[in-house]
Image (spheres, rainbow, N blue to C red):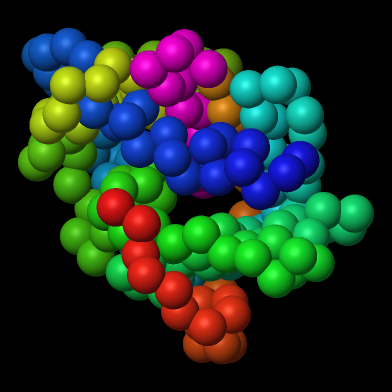
Amino acid sequence: MDTQTTRRALLLAAPALMLAGPALALNPADQALVDKAVAYLQGLPSARGRFVQTDPRGSVTQGVIYMQRPGRARFEYDAPSSLLVVSDGKVVSVADKRLKTVNRYFLSQTPLKLFLADEIRLDRGVAVTRVERRNDGFAITAQDRVGKTRGQIILTFGDSPMQLQGWKITDARNAETQVRLTSLVRTTDLDPGLFRAPFPRQPTQR
């Protein structure tokens, strides 16, 4: 997968979080699941695990993910990919280590902001449009309340144990990118250097 594809698949699906419809009037059972998801994410200050990403072309890549709230994440893609995605809390860098190139975007412009925030909120700035129960857990479909571009993000959670399993982003052109998390575990010993922006800083793209 090239840098351009990854950039679109993982990060520039930010328009997929723009408003595409009204917020769902949740029934008590659905609201309880949303509250459960928020409590879980709020109680997950840092974690590491594996991810498998399927882009809109059907290409599959995988690697290691590190997450540390607020705002920090690192996606290390396995070889032969030379891609590295790092959020330092404010800016997300999409780098190609082989080509020594990097593109940078504000974290607030990416879907990562939804579950890397200091305070996780699914009732402020986000419209929950569907809560779906599944055999092994549940899924929450959300959209940003601002903007004009259609799209959505679906967060999936497992019940036994309670765990974030991944997310799927559908952009304005109905292109879907799915990130599945495996072996995600809480941790307290992540090296701060994991979240330093790769290569010298360049002007942030808006």
For image coordinates 17% across by 21% down, the residue present is 148
Identify whether 153 is placed above or below 51. Answer: above
- What range is drawn magenta here? 163-175
For image coordinates 47% across by 27% down, the residue present is 169
- Name the residue nearer the viewer: 161 or 122: 122
For image coordinates 78% across by 34% down, the residue present is 60
For image coordinates 55% across by 45% down, the residue present is 7
Instruction: Please say whether residue 166 is one of the residues in the magenta stretch.
Output: yes
Residue 162 visible in the shown view? no
Q: Quadrant of residue 72?
A: bottom left
Q: Position of residue 157 (x, y in %)?
A: 48, 35
Q: Quadrant of residue 203?
A: bottom left
Relative placement, left or right, of 139 versus 21 is: right
Identify whether 7 is placed above or below 60. Answer: below
Examine the residues drawn in magenta and state their main secondary structure: strand
Relative placement, left or right, of 15 versus 26 is: right
Relative placement, left or right, of 34 versus 159 is: left
- Name the residue nearer the viewer: 61 or 122: 61
Q: Position of residue 111 (x, y in %)?
A: 38, 43
Q: Position of residue 84 (x, y in %)?
A: 66, 62
